[in-house]
Image (spheres, helix red, strand yellow):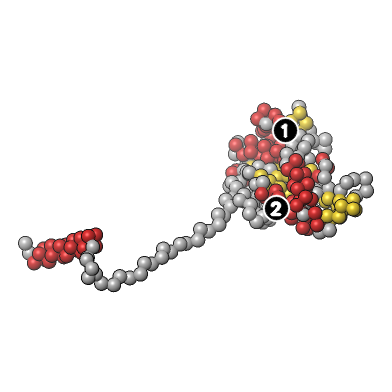
Amino acid sequence: MSKPGKRAAGLALVAFGALALGHCGGGSGAGPTDPPVPPVTTPTPAPTPAIDPPISASCAKLPLGSVGGRCNMEASEYQDIVDRAIRTLQGEQPAIFEGDQVLSIGAYYVGLIKILDRQGLCAATDGEELGVTDRASSNEQFDVLSAQSRARFGPVSYRVTCSPSAVPIPQGGMIPPPAGCTLPSSREIACGREPHGRYHDDVEAAIAQLQKDKPELFDFNDTAQGTSWPALKNVDAYVQGVIDILAKKGYCARNDGEELAIKHGSNTFSEQYDIDFQHKYIRTGAGIYRLSCYPAAF
């Protein structure tokens, strides 16, 4: 064996002996040892809410639309496609229709946008018309909902062709999630009143619970005329109290300055509630539900 080989073998034996002493103990003559070092713990960062995927992947592929294009009536390229999309939606989501009557305006527009997206078409609404295109050079505008909330078909629904395209519609920034809300921010496409609010009972229960938990916020000797709604001593504290109770039930809720916006479990939709009267009294009953927004409005 060469000298380097002998040296390596010797080092191996020394290392083995040190390991053996470490495991078998070194008797009473062992020297001083270093004090144990406490483990370093890294605080777990708070989870950052994810970002919802775009409603229309086709729109995400196009540049933002122009707000200064020229619009004229021309021969429609997408008329039949839009009509078929409405019929497809009636088959896929019959619960949001009664015949051609639309029961959920928000779900109607979101459903049409998703169906058209499956066909490679970008669709977006400004709240009045539906813009449709597959290119940046132009788009067509359709009025697919009558003033009586009925689905509109045929040439009467086509309005104009705009060049360059007005869609995708430019949007501003989104509202940050409320404190404690684990859902990401969202932006509504369309809102409308539905036959009833799905969160209504929980909102009513929260208002009732707050009156029991914090009676100091209310003046029960002063009620709104013709009602049993007590006066509020602190409107902001009242609204925040309702939000806190709903949060304990898993809701995300925020005060938008006029109404209470709430969502639960996903960003599919949110609902708006008006829970004070004249900014002076509480408000309860069926009238507190205002609108449903699709997707959620925050």
Residue 130 appears in the picture as rendered: no
Residue type at tag 1: Ile
User: Which residue is at 76% across, 33% downward?
Assistant: 102
The picture places residue 54, in percent across and down from the top left corner, at 61, 46
Q: Which residue is mark 2?
A: 244
Is the residue 203 above or below the residue 100 in the image? Answer: below
User: Label for residue 43?
Assistant: none
User: Residue 224 location in percent, x, y?
Assistant: 90, 50
Image location (x, y in percent) of residue 143: 76, 39
- Residue lying furthest bottom in this view? 32
Quadrant of res 174: bottom right
Front residue of 263 and 191? 263
Q: Is residue 103 left or right of residue 15?
A: right
Q: Which residue is mark 1?
A: 96
Give the amino acid type for the residue marked by disc 2 in the picture. Asp
Which one is in front, 9 or 272? 9
Disc 2 and disc 1 in contact, CB within 8 angstroms: no
Residue at 79% x, 50% y is: 211
In the foreground, 219 or 245: 219
Whole-number angstrom distance, CA of label 2 to CA of label 1: 32 Å
- Seen from the viewer's position, the closer of residues 59 and 1 is 1
In the picture as drawn, the residue positioned furthest to the front comes out as 28
| Quadrant into which the N terminus falls | bottom left
Q: Is residue 3 visible?
A: yes
Q: Going by the picture, which residue comes out furthest to the right?
A: 225
Secondary structure beneath label 2:
helix
Q: Earlier in the sequence, mark 2 or mark 1?
A: 1
Q: Residue at x 71, y 37 (%)?
A: 108
